[in-house]
Amino acid sequence: MIGPESGANLPEAAQAEFPMRGLAKELSKQEFAETAERTLREYGVASILTFYRTIREGRGKEILGTVSERGSETEIGLESNTEHMFVNMCNANQLPVFIIGEHHSYKSPQTNGIEPKHIALFDALDDTREYEQGGQGQQGLPAPLWTAGSIYSLEGNPVVGIIVNMKEKKMYVSANGKNSLVDLETNEEKEIKPSERTSIKDKGFCLATYLGEPKYALSFFKNFSEVEEALMEADNDAVNQPHTGSFIYGPMAEGNVDAYLIAREPISEQLPGWAFAQVAGFTAWEINPKDGSYKEIKHDLNSFKENPSEYRKGRMPVYLVTRSDQVRDEIIALIVKGHKKQEFQKIKDLFISTRTEEFEIFRASRKSQDSSGN
């Protein structure tokens, strides 16, 4: 039996366990890849067939509980239902994986001595906060609802990924070393390619970030003001995409977004869609804004398997994703420039504050002397 691990205050109905069928044999690498792709494609189609009307009618917003590992974040009914569907479909297809989501994790049992060698990192519902606005039966803020997940080997190699726009019936699929977009209204599938732009000065350059919550918006304009200013001043129809999440790697793989910059990005917002970025040739960087040094971000998926809370709690201080090294270097230079301006302003403010205090002491002293003289 498998079921949600501890980590959320949920009612009993939401803690139902899910049976996993015994595995007749260990799957070969090819068999696993085929089963994983079939499972995720089936899940993508089923999620729309099952929840499309619910989403259009603004239902499924009942709060099931809070999740301590994600601050004040809550889990809503629709999110729980999509997660349960994903787990059940993995079980039905006898897919041997560890599954870790934003709220729960699931472990399959050892069967005939077989232990899963792959991990599914899953975001049951992306854009939840926007959807919750307005209450039950109302549309909320105008943002698509997404569900995203990627399956990796425990060494970190992507096997398959899926990102579904549940409101618009579109599905991104990453499999066999290529990314594609499926229109589920027409069943048309086409391969997608990333942008060839190599500079923030290139026409139509698009930078993605997240400005949907005050803390993220304030952080962006405080830490990355020079980046924003450079995009505003560039005469190249540059675009700032202010709405992101685990789904953003689909549009990046499609060539609509060239770079992604944010402070304190949760790991659980990166990895569910990261398979697309890896296949498309993007790299994730951790930036030091003081000196511009950087290092490639790589995660130990085995550690997440052993300690799922590490995955849910983890954040990346200054997170930058680029495909072009030149774009990376241009953005880092602007980040460092902005940091130096901030430091100079702090020194200037301190100097002014100190001199003001000294002047007030001097003025008080003079008043005292004048009073004594009189």
Image (cartoon, rainbow, N blue to C red):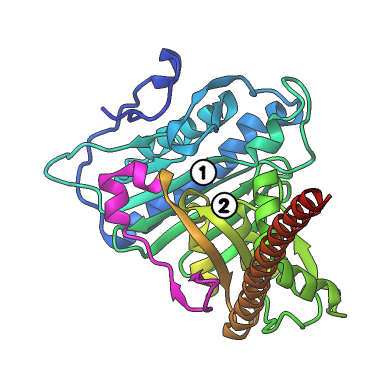
Under circle 2, the secondary element is helix
Foreground residue, 38 or 109?
109
Where is residue 339? Give x, y as percent: 62, 71
In the rendered image, residue 110 lying in the magenta stretch gets the answer no
Residue interval drawn in magenta: 283-311
Q: Which mark is residue 246?
A: 2
Mark 2 and 1 residues: CB-CB less than 8 Å, in contact? Answer: yes
Q: Residues within 10 Å of mark 1 (few under 14, many from 20)?
A: many
- Which residue lies at the image location 61% right of the left edge and 47% below the top edge? 164
- Give the side of residue 292 with respect to residue 330, left or right: left
> Relative to 255, does residue 300 appear above or below in the rendering?
above
Q: Amino acid at mark 1?
A: Asp
Q: Please identify the residue farthest to the left as the structure is shown.
A: 113
Where is residue 338? Give x, y as percent: 67, 72
- Which residue lies at the image location 78% right of the left edge and 37% below the top edge? 141
Quadrant in which residue 296 is drawn: bottom left
Q: Amino acid at mark 2?
A: Ser
Foreground residue, 54 or 39?
54
Q: Which residue is mark 1?
A: 123
Where is residue 105? Give x, y as percent: 36, 37
- Which residue lies at the image location 80% right of the left edge and 53% below the top edge? 373
Foreground residue, 172 or 247?
247
First along the sequence among labels 2 and 1: 1
Find the distance from the CA under tag 2 to the CA under tag 1: 7 Å
